[in-house]
């Protein structure tokens, strides 16, 4: 499904601030896999997602999605297959438009944005039932501006919008990090439910080790641009938070901090 | 007195179309587009040239609109594809349009006395007692049509994208749409409206003046700010109506200022001061620390 081949990425090349992040980095994710990515700050998790989504280009190497060469495609072209939810709840929705307007545009992805009516009133009931499942009361606020929603509500909406038209690949970058523990759990449960229902291949970055052990069927730990740990299925099931923490600490000690 | 009031409303409605354009470029797209200072006289230039060639004045409105669309799209291309900063793209387009406008008309100003305009043609259909108000009615009609068409567009799928690109460009990318393309479309529509206003104004004052565009952007912006802040509470008007009313209020203020002894050349200074005061007080009221205009 997703294949990164010999990725090289250096920031500020040729200056004193030169930072080699990825050198010959490789990663393969088969269809339907739900991968959790953990790792310390600055280990390259966001950059990894940026390289996949096309928000950042690689110095050399190849990015394949579904066997198609994505390496030189712009981000909005890649978006035909890839959806993304960011840490910042503001990034996935349009605040000056209402909930139903937001859902309508998300629903129209991959179809032409022409001069026909923007509001999808025919699907109003469907949107209502979809929002109802969240239990956040959003189903009664279809006509309110998204700007008035809380961070958790906006993030739940952003997640629904990102997956309304099923993407082939879903990228989640600490998408629960800005939320309080309860909203965070609600959004994470919703994530799991959507991914399972729609069978979406997913790459989820998280700092929450509980989520990393509890969700998904593969776990990768990043450190300085390399995957220092990569466990699948059964092996991952047996991994506890403490195990992960231990590895985390070992790496830190090796680096002398 | 009545004459003064009709004059204010006429001017307010004509420039209200400018405000509709600035509403798109500045408020929706967050793009301080100075090319409007060139597209307003562009509309006038295209209109004078065509009217002198004997073209139907109503067709001139359309031609001006499309000339503005083209210029606006070019500003967008400068910004999006050539990566020139927004403010500079507009300034470059405005500068280039000065030469274009001169070329189109062949002179820095031109009188259209005695030529057929939308106002003379409309006069023929009205009963004699309405004649003094013919210009006002024609302008009202054009402004309302422009407003309604824009309202309709902003409710279409394409219009939804336009609204989201200024708000959250990332969302447009996520929808697999090219945000640059939408920006260009937005600027094209904005400048099309401004050139349309230029055409109406030129036919109303029966003259083309190459420097008539100076201050268009700031004036339009003032009206948008009046419309979105002073009239914020009037929830039964939608935003496009509010910016048009904002322009009428603006024109009324200017008329009063001139009546109280100021010269019209003092206006640019007054506008700028008023403008800064509105922006700053507005920010303080909203408690925002965001970058100002
Ligand atoms: N645009 C950039 N210019 C220069 N350096 C960058 C840039 N983007 C990322 N980096 C560097 O690359 C490294 C990895 O950054 P990245 O954002 O991918 O980390 P991360 O794993 O997402 O961290 P966090 O957990 O804090 O989100 C960091 O050292 C960062 O300073
Ligand atoms: Mg990050």
Image: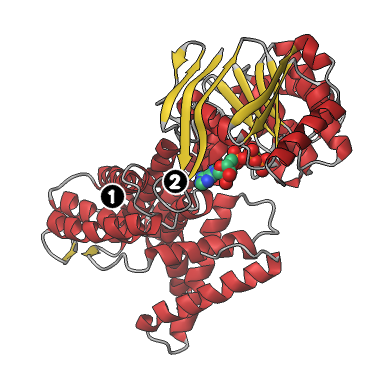
Image position of B285 (left or right of B41): right
The span from disc 1 to disc 2 (Cα, nearest Å) is 20 Å
Give x and y (percent) for residue B222: 50, 66
Give x and y (percent) for residue B203: 28, 58
Is residue A132 visible to us here? Answer: yes
* Label 1 neighbour load within 10 Å: few <14, some 14-19, many 20+: some
For this rendering, which residue is in front, B42 or B261? B42
Query: Numbered disc 2: what chain?
Result: B
Give x and y (percent) for residue A162: 64, 26
Residue drawn at x 37%, y 44% as measured from the top left: B80
Residue drawn at x 48%, y 10% as measured from the top left: A67
For this rendering, which residue is in front, B209 or B3? B209
SS class, disc 2:
helix
SS class, disc 1:
helix
For this rendering, which residue is in front, B20 or A43? A43
The reply to the same-chain question for discs 1 and 2 is: yes
Tell us which disc is closer to us: 1 or 2.
2
**Between discs 1 and 2, the one toward the N terminus:** 1
Where in the image, quadrant-wise, is ligand 1 located? top right
Q: Is residue A251 above or below residue B51?
A: above
Query: Numbered disc 1: what chain?
Result: B
In the rendered structure, find residue B121 and report the number of the disc placed on it: 1
Image position of B275 (left or right of A96): left
Task: Quickly name the residue at label 2.
Answer: B146
How are the residues colored? secondary structure
Q: Quadrant of residue A205?
A: top right
Residue drawn at x 70%, y 69% as measured from the top left: B285
Residue drawn at x 49%, y 24% as measured from the top left: A78
Give x and y (percent) for residue A184: 82, 35
In the rendered structure, find residue A208 and report the number of the disc placed on it: none
């Amino acid at each position: 499904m997703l294949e990164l081949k010999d990725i090289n990425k250096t920031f500020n090349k040729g200056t004193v601030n030169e930072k080699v992040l990825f050198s010959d980095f490789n990663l393969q994710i088969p269809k339907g896999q739900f991968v959790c990515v953990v790792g310390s700050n600055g280990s390259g998790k966001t950059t990894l997602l940026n390289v996949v989504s096309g928000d950042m280009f690689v110095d050399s190497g190849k990015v394949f999605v579904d066997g198609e060469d994505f390496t030189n495609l712009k981000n909005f072209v890649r978006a035909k297959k890839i959806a993304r939810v960011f840490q910042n709840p503001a990034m996935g929705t349009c605040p000056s438009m209402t909930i139903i307007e937001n859902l309508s545009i998300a629903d129209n992805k991959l179809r032409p944005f022409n001069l026909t009516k923007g509001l999808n009133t025919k699907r109003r009931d469907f949107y209502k039932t979809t929002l109802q499942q969240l239990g956040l009361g959003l189903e009664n606020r279809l006509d309110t501006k998204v700007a008035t929603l809380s961070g958790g509500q906006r993030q739940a909406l952003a997640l629904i919008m990102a997956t309304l038209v099923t993407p082939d690949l879903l990228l989640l970058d600490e998408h629960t990090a800005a939320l309080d523990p309860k909203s965070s759990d609600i959004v994470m449960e919703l994530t799991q439910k959507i991914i399972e229902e729609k069978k979406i291949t997913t790459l989820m970055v998280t700092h929450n080790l509980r989520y990393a052990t509890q969700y998904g069927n593969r776990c990768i730990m990043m450190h300085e641009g390399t995957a220092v740990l990569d466990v699948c299925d059964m092996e991952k099931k047996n991994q506890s938070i403490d195990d992960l923490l231990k590895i985390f600490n070992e790496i830190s000690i090796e680096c002398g901090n | 007195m009545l004459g003064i009031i009709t004059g204010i409303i006429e001017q307010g409605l004509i420039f209200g179309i400018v405000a509709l354009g600035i509403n798109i470029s500045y408020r929706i797209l967050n793009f301080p587009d100075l090319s409007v200072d060139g597209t307003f006289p562009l509309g006038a230039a295209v209109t004078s040239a065509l009217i002198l060639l004997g073209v139907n004045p109503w067709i001139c409105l359309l031609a001006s609109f499309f000339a503005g669309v083209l210029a606006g799209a070019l500003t967008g291309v400068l910004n999006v594809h050539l990566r020139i900063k927004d403010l500079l793209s507009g300034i470059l387009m405005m500068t280039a349009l000065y030469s274009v406008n001169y070329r189109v008309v062949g002179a820095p100003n031109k009188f259209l006395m005695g030529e057929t305009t939308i106002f003379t043609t409309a006069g023929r259909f009205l009963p004699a007692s309405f004649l003094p108000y013919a210009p006002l009615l024609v302008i009202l009609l054009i402004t309302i049509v422009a407003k309604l068409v824009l309202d309709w567009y902003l409710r279409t799928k394409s219009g939804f994208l336009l609204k989201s690109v200024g708000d959250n460009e990332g969302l447009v990318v996520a929808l697999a749409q090219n945000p640059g393309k939408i920006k260009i479309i937005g600027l094209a529509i904005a400048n099309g409206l401004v050139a349309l206003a230029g055409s109406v104004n030129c036919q109303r004052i029966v003259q083309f003046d190459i420097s008539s565009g100076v201050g268009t952007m700031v004036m339009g912006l003032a009206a948008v700010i009046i419309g979105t802040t002073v009239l914020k509470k009037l929830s039964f008007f939608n935003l496009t109506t509010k910016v048009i009313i904002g322009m009428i209020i603006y024109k009324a203020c200017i008329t009063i200022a001139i009546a109280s002894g100021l010269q019209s050349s003092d206006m640019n200074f007054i506008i700028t001061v008023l403008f800064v005061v509105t922006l700053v007080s507005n920010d303080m009221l909203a408690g925002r620390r965001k970058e100002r205009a």
